[in-house]
Image: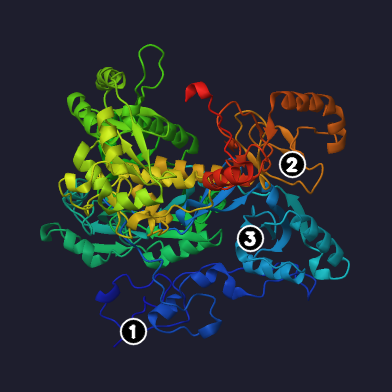
Amino acid sequence: MIPCKYFRTRIGCARGTHCRYAHEESASASPFNVPTFPKPAGDRGNSNITPTSPHKDSLSKVPCVFFLRGYCRNGSACSFSHQSDQSHALSRPDTDSNYKEPTTEHCTRELCGASVTFDDGAQVSKVSFPSDFSAVRIDGLPLNSNPGFVTTTLSGLGFELPDTCVRILAHGGSTDKLSAIVQMEDPSFAANLREELERRKSRDAKYIQLEAVHIPPSVLSESAARRVDSRRVICSWRKPSRRAKIKFGNESIAKRVMGKFQDGRYKILGDKVDCDLVTRFAGRANSVNLTTVWTVVLKNLPGVTTENDIARAIQSYDRPRDIELDNPTYSITDNQACSTIKSMFLSVGPLDLWEASADWDAQRMKAKARFQNDTDAREAAKRLNRETLPFYKFGRLSVDLITRAKFKVSTNIYDAVQPVIEQENSTWSGERIKLHTYRNVDATQKYTVLTLGGPAANEVAKAKDKLANILTGHIAVDADDDTPIWGGFFNSRKAHNDLKFVENDFGVVIVIDKRKSRLRLYGSAQNCKDATIRLREIANADFSIRYIVLDVFKYWWAAHGGFQRIVAAVGEGVAAMDTISTPKRIIISGSAQDFETASAICQGQIRQSEKAKVEAGKSDDCTVCWTEAENPIRTQCEHLYCLDCFENLCWSAASGNKEAAISCQGDEGRCNAIFSLRELQEHLPSSSFEEILEASLTSHVRRRPQDFRYCPTADCGEIYRNCAEVNNTVRICGKCCLATCTSCHAPHEGMTCGEYKDIASGGHEAFERLKEKGGWKDCPKCGTTIEKTDGCNHMTCPGCRIHICWVCLETFQADGPCYEHMNRRHGNIGLFIPLDDL
């Protein structure tokens, strides 16, 4: 077959597979040129450093077009990828009906001035401070440097570090050198590197061009903050296009055809196109009789448009005299263009996500990328926006940094506040902020996810705060002093059932916030106001909650039918188990007679033979309260919980005094399967999940007074690392700016610890005399001053929550061993009851 003369050109054959000539491959002409990294102009011998690892270059991530077609003459020496990786291929974006929770084995949050990493069970695995890191900016690197080359260079200086510690900075084009930022979790790294580099310069000429500048480390990021993600960018670029000239010898036909293209009656590949009418004269230069030609110019046609496509779009009675097609703006495929753009982003930093739009009819290609950290995302938006396309010198890449906030709420709460959110969304739309709603994202279809995103970080932050305020709800308060309405009744299981009637009567949703002892109402302002009046009446009613404390034997009895006998005697909703507290207990939320009956059954005063036979626990009972699960959730270990009980379990484990992960209490406490972070996120609202992480950190810090301290400024809340072995190390609080010594924990900037103690000794001695007079003592673990006013000699430190014997100040991890110690060593627990009270 005769070879096609256009196929081997740079533009290629526009007819594609429809061409009647042979499209034989030739590796002599590349369909597009991707720029390579040249060596610096000043290279001479070994006087300059030259990267020697092109396979680590970002070009290695771009697929070789000749390899994809079957043969590349460069073989293994080719700078482009010879792999059939389809990770750059186009894909359909997710719709609003399908939200995917990110899969992660750990998560990082910025809390209390630190970067905190959590593992499964919401356990704190690592706490990092900016003072734990040091960073340098290395100037004078060759233009084709990459992270692998930088780590190799530093290895020659004796510093071993992974590529992830290096970030290449963009150059402005006015210099032939690059810079890179290197950060290590080592406070002395920057000083040691600078010292070693200066020492090597005197002996090895290849290091002369390098300069190391000490810069502040970047540890805390916006993406690590609560519910905010600034790691995403969206980009777009023009698809290949071409012009067509349709020539007519009749003016009326030309105008008729132009009108049909303009109003959409004639379309090219199913799309409406722009067109103009151009008139010119054709003929020989010295000929008297010139022919008038009317030309309809079709603009911005898809690059794959052929003459046949245009001819098929025009009816036979409008047939033109001739059709001419200009060359496409570029001739690579959309997938090849996507892989090239992706490589540009990879040159900035590693990606977690790359998705290209599959909207084939659009004039622009669109893609979204998510970087592993927000620093790279900001750098990509700064460096690559308006950058020339490698495959089209007249094209520009458009890049926007997207700030995104996410909320996960109960669907019934979202339904109650949806009108208010939609009203606010009309304002957000005008500020280029998009709200997306993903309903029923979980298996039990209880939750709805809301996301806010836009290029203006400040506007997204304002919208996030507004949405968070809406989702907080109305707090039911007392009419007299505006304090939150609360009472013992709302801690009971019966309260859930009774409040449902209030919800139905007033068209609101009521959430019982037991941790903060308040009721949250969702709905219209008037409905919430009317429902609050009813809640005040309920709170003022005569109601009490009583507890039956269970020892090991009584708990076994309750688990093997005893609790069900109590339920049968006092009725559904009156008795509930509390397997989270220590010791475990039965909660009686009813009358005094109900409590007496339950206590008598527990003590064996009412024999089993006197009671009707009761069923054992049902399969749909909650693992914690042993009653029918309300708003049930089922864990991966196949145990059932009430949603409220599950939240309380997570909160209790995260904020407890022991080093324990959040684990399942199924099978009478024998399951102990640790809940993964993914499972916790799946079953908890986003606000509860974040609060549990915060509680876990608070408990972690409280149990380690030898490692961490809180800023001494009241209500500051920032923490810092205890450096008792290093004197006079001053730490400036990032929140309140107080200068605190990390050794003695006092604010004495400009003085040594000894000087400050000498000056403050007068006040210190006076305080010690006051402590001795009042009988105050310091916690032996964290040093918190404690006052005992009454009760037994078992004390719990308000600072670190350790259990203390007040007589000898011995410490214990739980209250049980403390009581055993007091009875064994001191003969009693310190309670003396007057004879008149007996």
Residue 147 located left or right of residue 285: right
Distance Cα–Cα, label 1 vs label 3: 52 Å
Q: Eyeballing the image, is 94 above or below 391?
A: above
- The quadrant in which residue 549 appears is top left
Where does residue 98 sit, x and y in percent of width and height? 28, 52
Q: Nearer the viewer, mark 3 or mark 2?
A: 2
Distance Cα–Cα, label 2 vs label 1: 79 Å
Q: Eyeballing the image, is 104 above or below 805?
A: below
Which residue is identified by label 3? 165
**Can you name the residue that lies furthest to the left here?**
317
Where does residue 538 sit, x and y in percent of width and height? 27, 21
- Proximity of marks 3 and 2: CB atoms separated by less than 8 Å: no
Which secondary structure, mark 2? loop
Distance Cα–Cα, label 3 vs label 2: 28 Å
Q: Tell me the quarter of the image containing the N terminus.
A: bottom left
Where does residue 196 sit, x and y in percent of width and height? 82, 63
Which residue is identified by label 1? 3
Tag 3: amino acid: Cys
N-terminal of the pair, mark 3 or mark 2, is 3
N-terminal of the pair, mark 2 or mark 1, is 1
Q: Can residue 228 be seen?
A: no
Please rate how many residues cluster around mark 2, counting C-alpha atoms within 10 Å: few if below 14, some from 14 to 19, many from 20: many
Tag 2: amino acid: Thr
The tag on residue 742 is 2
Q: Residue at x 83, y 69 (%)?
A: 205
